[in-house]
Image (cartoon, helix red, strand yellow):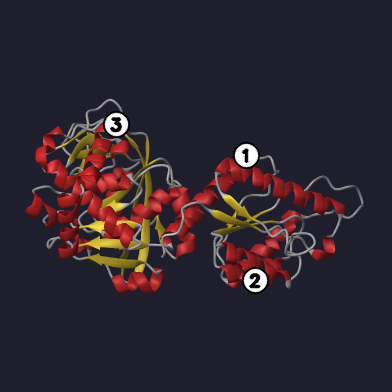
Amino acid sequence: MKNREKRLRIGLVPTRREAFRNEITTKQKEAVVKRFYELAQQLDFDIVGIEDINEEGMLMHYRDVKAAYEKLTAAGVDALIVPHCNFGQEEAVGRLAKDMGLPVLIWGPRDGYPNGLEWRPTDSQCGMFATTKLLMHYGVKFSYIENCALDSDILVHGLQDFLAAANVVKAFRALRIARISSRPKEFLSVMVNESELLEKYDIEIVPGEPTVILDMVDQILAGEKDRMEALLQDLVDAGLDISRLGEKRYPLAAIELALMDFAEDNCCNAISCECWNLFRVKYGVSPCFILGDLNDRGIPAACENDVHAAITSVMAVAASRYTTPSFVADLTIRHPENDNAELLWHCGSFAKRLKKKGVEGYIIEQGKGFYELEGGKVTVLRFDGIDGKYYMFAGEAKGVDGPITNGNYLWVETDDWVKWEKKFIFGPYIHHVVGMQGSYTQIIQEACRYLDIQIDLPDMPNIY
């Protein structure tokens, strides 16, 4: 099963150069470990230490690598933090990082005052220069927090960003996507290369055949009224008006439950779904709102069978460490009065949790959600590929006022919309993007370094 638990488990690997053994280094290591356990409580992650691999609980010799590797691998850590308690042991750090194949954070506490003509006891900063050069020789990608004090906000903020980036890497490397039916006939632009995604990124696509899915829906409709009623009541409790659905509320609930069941039964952590014909023809209701609600329930889901949008959504919510859902939107029209603003819209598939405070939210008879989204800072993302190369567009905008429209929508203002428009014309992208409330570009950029994905920011040259 590829869908691992979401809580991060981090290997804490203090290191020292053996020849630098002294009381100050030992005290520094103890202070560093204590501080990271405090930060683990504050930032909500688990630590796996190496206290028992040798007498000092530090990576000091090349021979320590085997014991550290075995312990950290058995614990299933998702990333490594390597504090340099003095100069550090570069050959041991390099070998361990290479063998583990995980995101690595290099950091060391800022060195204290030299004691006159005595030998300096730590020189942590100096050692990090050596370690990072060796990591480059090994082909190991790494992250870095600037040399700073243990109680510095720089350490806290840098660690937050590293954890979020490591979370994206973890989620991406566990991707198994349920692809429900086929893409709409007209949508050649959402074509994907399944074999390439598997060979390059180990992303598995699980077909959800229409007959299987429809049979699951029919079984729920026939015998699981309590589950349907519970789901519908959950929508009402969230403040949505479902009265317009009438009797179609039961097919809507049954479709959502069937998709959740299929994903769970097949160990999938995301869904890409055909939304034009499969359910509408048989039940008279489209899965638009359903896909948004799946996002709200922690299952990233993309409409119009856009697998690349589903991949983007998984990365987006992982960047937030699962604090907010994402939404799949069309880039539709420019704001009629604001040249730098654009309409992010779709026909009712945005998570209900994102609804703008104070506006009415309802589901129409056809199964589409109608409500505007909350504004503020918005990160806009798109993972896509061409010619065997894969890119991630990442840009940031802010929500602004604009004309009322149907479905789900949010007007956003960019720094220069023409620059963004050209990026989507000349990049390997389509009109689908993934939105996230918040600022995550830096985190996504860091994660892409680990994943062999070319980051593509608005100010970079266009690809084509």
For label 1, the residue is 153
Q: How many marks?
A: 3
Which amino acid lies under the numbered mark 3 shown in the image of this protein?
A: Lys
Residue positioned 16% across, 42% down in the render: 368
The percent coordinates of residue 142 (x first, y second) are: 57, 60
The disc, 2 or 1, on the residue closer to the chain's N-terminal end is: 2
The percent coordinates of residue 143 (x first, y second) are: 57, 56
Mark 1 and mark 3 in contact? Answer it, CB < 8 Å: no
The disc, 2 or 3, on the residue closer to the chain's N-terminal end is: 2
> How far is mark 2 from mark 1, CA to CA?
30 Å
> How far is mark 1 from mark 3, CA to CA?
32 Å
> How far is mark 2 from mark 3, CA to CA?
50 Å
The percent coordinates of residue 226 (x first, y second) are: 23, 43
Which amino acid lies under the numbered mark 2 shown in the image of this protein?
A: Arg
For label 2, the residue is 95
Q: Is residue 26 left or right of residue 321?
A: right
Residue positioned 10% across, 40% down in the render: 247
For label 3, the residue is 356
Q: Which quarter shows the C terminus?
A: bottom left
Which amino acid lies under the numbered mark 1 shown in the image of this protein?
A: Asp
Question: Mark 2, residues whose alpha carbon is within 10 Å: few (<14), some, or many (≥20)?
Answer: some
The percent coordinates of residue 58 (x first, y second) are: 74, 60
Can residue 383 be seen from the camera position used here? Answer: no
Mark 2 and mark 1 in contact? Answer it, CB < 8 Å: no
Can residue 390 be seen from the camera position used here? Answer: yes
Q: Which quarter shows the N terminus?
A: bottom left
Tag on residue 272?
none
Q: Quadrant of residue 346?
A: top left
